[in-house]
Amino acid sequence: MARMTPDDRREAIIAATLAVIQRRGIAATTVRDVAAELGASSGLIHHYMTSMDELIAEAFERAAGADLLATRALVEQGQNPLEQLRFFFDSYTRSDGNSGMQLWLDAWAEAARRPELRQISQRLNEAWQQLICGIIEGGMRTGEMNCTDPAAAAWRILSLLDGLHLQEVAHGDSVTSSQVSTWSRRGAEIELGLVQGTLTSY
Amino acid sequence: MARMTPDDRREAIIAATLAVIQRRGIAATTVRDVAAELGASSGLIHHYMTSMDELIAEAFERAAGADLLATRALVEQGQNPLEQLRFFFDSYTRSDGNSGMQLWLDAWAEAARRPELRQISQRLNEAWQQLICGIIEGGMRTGEMNCTDPAAAAWRILSLLDGLHLQEVAHGDSVTSSQVSTWSRRGAEIELGLVQGTLTSY
DNA sequence: GGGCTTATTGGACATTTGCGCAATAGCGTC
DNA sequence: GACGCTATTGCGCAAATGTCCAATAAGCCC
């Protein structure tokens, strides 16, 4: 393997870890898998990461954080709160293989037992909730949305999405990808007093 | 170890497996752990279970199935759909240590990797959804509830509950146990066109 | 009490895992 | 072009895991 700058190599290792995690899940990811993905030796990973846990936590934060940033960037392009919320759902319910959601399932299950992972996952989930909360508060100011408790509504919208996604990823055919999209948008419409179809963008 | 009836021994193994799972989680449960918990040899477990997957699946089914039966029994004591739904929430959001919810988190995460487990978890989740769906349909007949798509509404109510519970179990202090109860009931009220407070029983 | 069935044992086995270490080789410096 | 630093290798080690199996012993029927 070509010799690289420590910074570059570290990035490459995290990227490779991410690829493996999305394919096999956190629990089944091994150092050797990452090395193979990277096209390098297993010893190299340990030259940069002190432990497997550090590797996992770092990769998870990178992946989940990137999703959040991407969605937030898309939302900010919305011209008004309604469009922002539509963009939010577009980004969150895009069907790109759901690999990201299995990652979250693993993280939530492991959170109780891995303090580092719990901290990251909690911080990111709260950021997601605040993203939604901000949209709702904007919608209340413009009068487009109606809601008595924006914070609670935001947690409900997020939890509903996660709960539906969970069914899709874990069980596959009891809740389909398009049902996740339709039902969660409909749930938000009901929650915020919107006319049916307002959040459907296609 | 004292010799036991196959039926009794099987029960004992499942009980021991459950104890280990609740302590260590599904992913970290090993045959040797179960044997130690049981106070018997590891070979004995395989004399009753053909594989580790079967063992895990059976234990999960026992625990999660019992919860479903208990809730269903409570619901059936409700005199009308509204009371039934209240009883449902009482049973589902009772705070008995959340051990049950961590079990579900493990199951959902492991479902992708353990076919037998996925089958059971899917079947149980669908049973939960049908329990809610039945209540809603009853409520529509009596005119107490208003809803255009009972099946979708039931999935939403269940997913919202699971999503909120998930936050509570995984992260602890971003969503509290009482918020799960309050917010999920409020979500159902909104979903079914009920007056605020209808589902609050205390 | 003897014999038969089978519950139970305890370890062997192959595989996989995270991790460490001595050896090697790539790149900059003089 | 030689030298030194260190990125990189590739193997080895110990521990853990699921599974299997021959040996043992506990209970039951005659």
Image (cartoon, coloured by chain):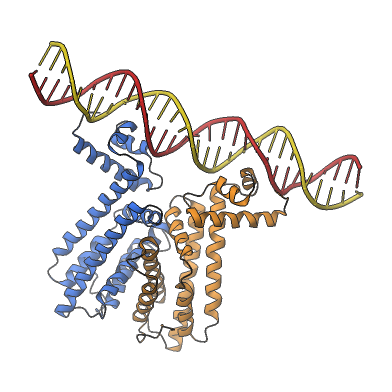
Chain colours: A blue, B orange, C red, D yellow
Drawn side of residue A119 relative to residue B138, left or right: left
Q: Residue at left 63%, top 43%?
A: B43
Q: Quadrant of residue A182?
A: bottom left
Q: Quadrant of residue B7?
A: bottom right
Drawn side of residue B83 relative to residue A169, left or right: right
Drawn side of residue B16 relative to residue A157, left or right: right
Q: Quadrant of residue A122?
A: bottom left
The percent coordinates of residue B174 (x first, y second) are: 32, 66
Q: Residue at left 33%, top 53%?
A: A117
Inspect this view and state whether residue A103 appears. Answer: no
Q: Residue at left 33%, top 43%?
A: A20
Query: Which residue is at the front of the view, A170 or A1?
Result: A1
Q: The C terminus of chain B appears in which quarter of the rendering?
A: bottom left
Query: Which residue is at the front of the view, A75 or B174?
Result: B174
The percent coordinates of residue A143 (x first, y second) are: 16, 80
The percent coordinates of residue A103 (x first, y second) are: 34, 53
Eyeballing the image, is D16 above or below A131? above
Inspect this view and state whether residue B197 appears. Answer: yes
Q: Residue at left 20%, top 57%?
A: A69
